Amino acid sequence: MLHRAGTGTGGHNGRMDAESLLHYCLAKPGAWPDNPWGHDHPVMKVGESTGGKIFAFLGEDGVGVKGGPSREVADEWLDRYPGAVTVMAYIGRSGWNDLSFSGEIPDEELLEAVDESYRLVVAKLPKKHRPEGWDD
């Protein structure tokens, strides 16, 4: 079950949170959690376990997603929500952004960002490793 603001079952302060987003991500075909660095929250991967690719970095205060196929496209998020979006360290040049759970970004847009990140990552997987049921 997805817990969202305004549903009475949302996260802390009625906003999206890491646990709610974890459940949302796990509902995606072929998605699974991994914790390669021992953080408090997992990363979400898609694809086979040996070749799985990250599509979301879950955190206490937000989620890291592939914001577009290029840095230029991902920068649109920075323009729309300058106080709630930052370029991710180390991988930001490849179009990855951190999106805040502060409430500035509506929950539906957070979910759409996760959906787009998933789509972008799955599309780059070899066809034999793409999960059944994903929309291309």
Image (cartoon, grey):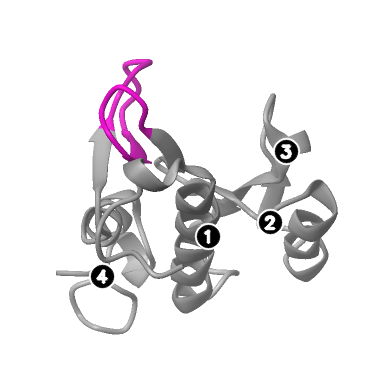
- Secondary structure, mark 3, is helix
User: Is residue 38 positioned above or below 14 on the image?
Assistant: above
Earlier in the chain: of badge 3 and badge 1, it is: 3
Res. 28 image quadrant: bottom left
Earlier in the chain: of badge 2 and badge 4, it is: 4
Circle 1: residue type: Ser
Residue 48 place in picture, x, y as percent = 27, 33
Q: Which mark is residue 68?
A: 2
User: Is residue 122 positioned above or below 88 on the image?
Assistant: below
Q: In whole angstroms, how far apart are the C-alphas of marks 3 and 2?
A: 8 Å
- Secondary structure, mark 1, is loop
Q: Which mark is residue 102?
A: 1
Q: In whole angstroms, how far apart are the C-alphas of marks 3 and 1?
A: 24 Å
Earlier in the chain: of badge 3 and badge 2, it is: 2
- Secondary structure, mark 4, is loop
Residue 64 place in picture, x, y as percent = 53, 44
Left or right: 85 with respect to 26?
A: right
Q: Which mark is residue 94?
A: 3
Q: Residues within 10 Å of mark 2 (few under 14, many from 20)?
A: many
Circle 3: residue type: Ser
